[in-house]
């Protein structure tokens, strides 16, 4: 059974993961408006992945006989100055989520909640991958600069992203 403190923290993370889903969906809409369908697709897939993360925690709380509390999520930004700005924001967002997961893990250690530590290890590993991917795309977008042909190629590459499996 989860402690009240751990349950509250996990419920907060569900909110953060759903919020992440909305952030990426808003970024996807921006990219669609810029006629960058591949980037938009990649960001929609990212939104779905974040939704899946929220549900993973949701299910975990229920499996531990806890009480899920769905909290309001803030409205995401909908305007961006450039594609570079979108992916700078993506990278910073992933770093913020990583810090949140690390704090949850520290709480689980403090509470000697070993099952939650095991569950959160999956998220820690996931965040390493998330930060690397965001960093790589940001670097590529910066390298492209004003090269329209290269932008089209990267857009086509990102369009090939398929949905991730829940257990990855």
Image (cartoon, rainbow, N blue to C red):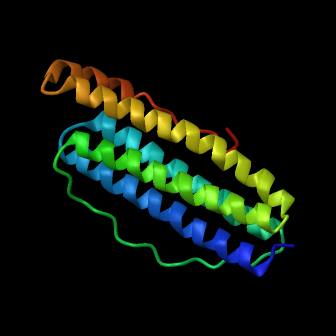
Q: Nearer the viewer, residue 129 or 24?
A: 129
Count of marks placed on residues? 0
Residue 105 figure quarter: bottom right
For residue 160, side relative to residue 168 (left or right): left
Q: Position of residue 96 (x, y in %)?
A: 47, 55
Does residue 41 lie above or below 115 as drawn? Answer: above
Does residue 16 lie above or below 2 as drawn? Answer: above
**Residue at 24% across / 50% down in the picture?**
30
* Res 63 seen here: yes
Does residue 1 lie above or below 81 as drawn? Answer: below
For residue 3, side relative to residue 149 (left or right): right
Q: Nearer the viewer, residue 62 or 82?
A: 82
**Residue at 19% across / 47% down in the picture?**
33
For residue 23, side relative to residue 68 (left or right): left
Q: Position of residue 108 (x, y in %)?
A: 76, 63
* Res 163 seen here: no
Residue 70 figure quarter: bottom right
**Quarter occupied by the C terminus:** top right
**Residue at 54% across / 69% down in the picture?**
15
Does residue 164 lie above or below 100 as drawn? Answer: above
Q: Position of residue 77 (x, y in %)?
A: 28, 62
Q: Position of residue 53 (x, y in %)?
A: 60, 54
For residue 45, side relative to residue 52 (left or right): left
Pick out the residue farthest to the front. Answer: 110
Q: Nearer the viewer, residue 107 or 62?
A: 107
**Residue at 48% across / 78% down in the picture?**
72
**Quarter occupied by the N terminus:** bottom right
């Amino acid at each position: 059974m989860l402690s009240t403190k751990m349950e509250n923290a996990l419920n907060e993370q569900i909110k953060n993961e759903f919020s992440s889903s909305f952030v990426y969906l808003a970024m996807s809409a921006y990219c669609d408006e810029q006629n960058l369908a591949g980037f938009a697709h990649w960001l929609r897939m990212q939104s779905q992945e974040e939704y899946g993360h929220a549900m993973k925690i949701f299910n975990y709380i229920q499996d531990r006989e806890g009480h899920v509390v769905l909290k309001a999520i803030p409205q995401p930004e909908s305007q961006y100055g450039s594609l570079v700005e979108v992916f700078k924001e993506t990278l910073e967002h992933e770093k913020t989520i990583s810090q949140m997961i690390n704090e949850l893990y520290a709480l689980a250690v403090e509470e000697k909640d070993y099952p939650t530590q095991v569950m959160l290890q999956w998220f820690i590993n996931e965040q390493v991958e998330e930060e690397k991917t965001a960093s790589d795309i940001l670097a590529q977008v910066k390298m492209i600069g004003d090269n329209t042909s290269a932008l089209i190629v990267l857009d086509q590459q990102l369009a090939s992203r398929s949905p991730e499996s829940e257990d990855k």
